[in-house]
């Protein structure tokens, strides 16, 4: 009985499993059947859609229809009229006429390369780049196959007019049908570089190499690699050419290495360029090559290698030019290398060397800033004694040296330079006179300053605001306060230039330095008369001085003026606090303190102890 029950249980379990498996098989078969039907339906729909798309495309294409004689004659006359309008530079009229034929579906019968070429040339000249792209599209749609000369002239014109995006559009859209012509791809590469698409220019190089290139045409490739920073490709091309490169290609290669921050590698390539000097080809390394490498070491801050390049340059019988010396001079100045500065200056002043005035001025300026005035004078003397008439000191040279001598308080040498200037027939400007006024002030030589001022006016040089400042300082330094006052009072009427608050403050400072308080107050009253607005410096200069002179009525007037002009400013509150304390210390009458406190209270100014 137990065995029978066990068999019965096993049979029931197997039956359930068989039933489940049967249901799964039926469902799987039904699903596969539905899936196959869905695929057949999708394929049918895709084929129908493709057939419709093909039909639409065919309908979009111009059909070859036979025209009657009248229509044919009208189309021929219209084409001739369009060409005539384009030749007369009537671009808009020609375009409208063409579009009228296009609306009638007759533009395919006008489709000639000459027609599209004229439209594109005219559209480029008037800046209608959208018309250029449209005409190229219609040209391809109407089955016109352009000749290489068409692409040549089109891209040359677009590139020369700097329509670089349009050039790149042509390459992207029609690059597969463009012929391998070096002029075409030269224009395309130039457009990509100018547009900032260096990687696209590098990609064009592959097609450019397939053109019939001469040695000089490889400059474009080196220029592309230099702009994109492709040092490996540039070096590989240099080795492939085996010394057939030109000097320009060599310099572009060195520029690429320097741009990639590899000056040492640039130096090795330069030496490799020298290895081809023994061949029949001309030398490909020149002074510019060394200048490029030296600039690379300057950026790296390696002054030792800079002078090593200079040494190699001279060993290979190449003379350093102004760029070489200027580059070396700048790094010596930056690193304060006195020996390097002296060496470069001695090379600049070498016998038989033609001096450039601009380079000499640059050296003089750098030497003055580096506190090497004697060396700057050496260059100045060499420039003066140069036999070349074009190499002479300019007004910039004189101005720098006079200012430098004034700064070291050597007025005598400054006047000698000024005398050289007059001897050479160079008219001094207002800035040079101003430097000399400063020198006279520092030396306390008022008569000389006054004489120079008269010479300045006699030579027709119009004095400026800075000139007035220097003259006021000169008068104040020498105690000629009355003349200083009249100079400010009459300045606007004489020289059509209104003094500012800076000049009045300078006049007051000179008076206060000599303890001429009444004269300083007269300058303030003159400033009010001319309605010149005061500033913080003037108030902080004059107000404490009036307290020191114990002119408390003037203190009240000036405080009232300052409060009206500046209100309860923090800096004014601080000055008035100091003024109140000093007035107490001087034991002024109580009525002045009471009035001052009333002014402060009215304006909401808090006085601190």
Image (cartoon, rainbow, N blue to C red):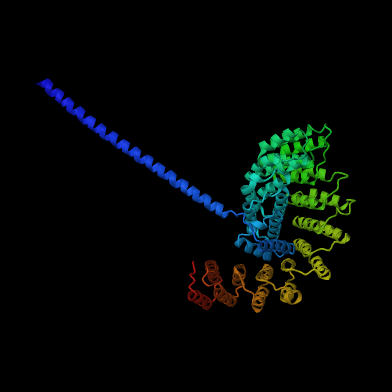
User: In this rendering, is residue 243 above or below 5?
Assistant: below
In the image, 483 versus 54, the foreground residue is 54
Q: x and y percent of residue 22 in the render?
A: 26, 32
Q: Position of residue 375 (x, y in %)?
A: 80, 48
Query: In this view of the protein, which residue sits in the foreground, 575 or 594?
Result: 575
Task: State the residue in front, 204 or 255.
Answer: 204
* Residue extending farthest right: 387
Residue 362 visible to an observer of this rendering: yes
Q: Position of residue 55 (x, y in %)?
A: 52, 51
Horizontally, residue 69 falls left or right of residue 418, namely left
**Residue 248 falls left or right of residue 520:** right
Whole-percent x, y for residue 281 in the image? 82, 35
- Marks counted in the figure total 0
For the point 74% across and 64% down, the residue is 88
Left or right of 223 on screen, residue 546: left
Res. 251 visible in picture:
no
For this rendering, which residue is in front, 383 or 576? 383
**Quadrant, the N terminus:** top left
The single residue placed furthest to the left in the displayed view is 1
- 330 relative to 572, above or below: above
Q: Is residue 290 above or below residue 545?
A: above
């Amino acid at each position: 009985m137990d065995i029978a029950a066990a068999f019965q249980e096993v049979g029931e379990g197997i039956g359930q499993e068989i039933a489940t498996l049967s249901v799964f098989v039926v469902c799987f078969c039904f699903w596969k059947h539905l899936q196959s039907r869905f695929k057949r339906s999708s394929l049918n729909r895709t084929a129908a859609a493709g057939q419709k798309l093909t039909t639409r495309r065919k309908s979009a294409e111009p059909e070859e229809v036979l025209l009657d004689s009248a229509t044919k004659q009208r189309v021929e006359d219209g084409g001739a009229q369009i060409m005539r309008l384009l030749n007369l530079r009537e671009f808009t009229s020609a375009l409208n006429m063409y579009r009228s034929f296009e609306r009638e579906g007759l533009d395919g019968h006008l489709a000639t390369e000459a027609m599209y070429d004229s439209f594109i040339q005219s559209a480029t000249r008037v800046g209608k780049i959208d018309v250029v792209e449209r005409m190229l599209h219609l040209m391809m749609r109407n089955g016109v196959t352009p000749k290489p000369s068409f692409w040549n002239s089109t891209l040359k014109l677009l590139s020369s007019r700097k329509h670089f995006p349009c050039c790149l559009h042509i390459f992207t859209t029609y690059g597969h049908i463009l012929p391998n012509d070096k002029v075409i791809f030269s224009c395309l590469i130039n457009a990509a570089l100018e547009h900032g698409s260096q990687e696209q220019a590098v990609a064009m190089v592959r097609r450019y190499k397939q053109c019939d290139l001469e040695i000089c045409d490889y400059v474009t490739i080196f220029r592309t690699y230099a702009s994109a920073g492709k040092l490996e490709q540039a070096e590989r091309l240099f080795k492939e050419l085996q010394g057939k490169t030109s000097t320009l290609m060599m310099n572009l290669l060195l520029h690429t290495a320097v741009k990639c921050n590899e000056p040492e590698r640039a130096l090795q390539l330069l030496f490799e360029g020298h290895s081809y000097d023994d061949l029949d080809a001309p030398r490909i390394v020149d002074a510019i090559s060394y200048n490029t490498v030296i600039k690379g070491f300057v950026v790296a801050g390696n002054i030792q290698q800079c002078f090593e390049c200079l040494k190699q340059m001279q060993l290979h019988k190449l003379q350093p030019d102004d760029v070489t010396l200027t580059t070396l001079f700048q790094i010596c100045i930056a690193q304060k290398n006195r020996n390097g500065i002296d060496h470069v200056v001695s090379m600049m002043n070498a016998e038989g060397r033609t001096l450039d005035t601009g380079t000499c001025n640059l050296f003089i300026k750098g030497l003055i800033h580096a506190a090497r005035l004697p060396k700057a004078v050496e260059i100045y003397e060499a420039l003066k004694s140069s036999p070349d008439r074009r190499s002479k000191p300019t007004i910039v040279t004189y101005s720098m040296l006079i200012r430098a001598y004034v700064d070291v308080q050597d007025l005598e040498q400054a006047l000698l330079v000024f005398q050289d200037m007059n001897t050479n027939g160079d008219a001094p400007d207002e800035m040079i006179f101003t430097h000399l006024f400063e020198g006279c002030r520092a030396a306390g030589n008022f008569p000389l300053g006054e004489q120079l001022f008269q010479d300045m006016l006699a030579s027709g040089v119009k004095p400026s605001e800075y000139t007035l400042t220097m003259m006021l300082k000169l008068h104040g330094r020498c105690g000629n306060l009355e003349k200083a006052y009249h100079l400010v009072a009459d300045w606007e009427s004489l020289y059509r230039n209104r003094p500012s608050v800076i000049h009045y403050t300078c006049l007051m400072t000179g008076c206060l330095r000599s303890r001429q308080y009444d004269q300083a107050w007269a300058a303030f009253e003159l400033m009010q008369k001319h309605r010149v607005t005061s500033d913080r410096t003037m108030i902080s200069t004059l107000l404490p001085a009036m307290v020191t002179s114990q002119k408390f009525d003037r203190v009240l007037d000036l405080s009232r003026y300052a409060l009206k002009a500046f209100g309860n400013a923090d800096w004014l509150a601080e000055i008035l606090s100091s003024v109140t304390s000093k007035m107490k210390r001087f034991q002024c009458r109580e009525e002045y303190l009471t009035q001052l406190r009333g002014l402060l209270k009215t304006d909401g100014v808090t006085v601190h102890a």
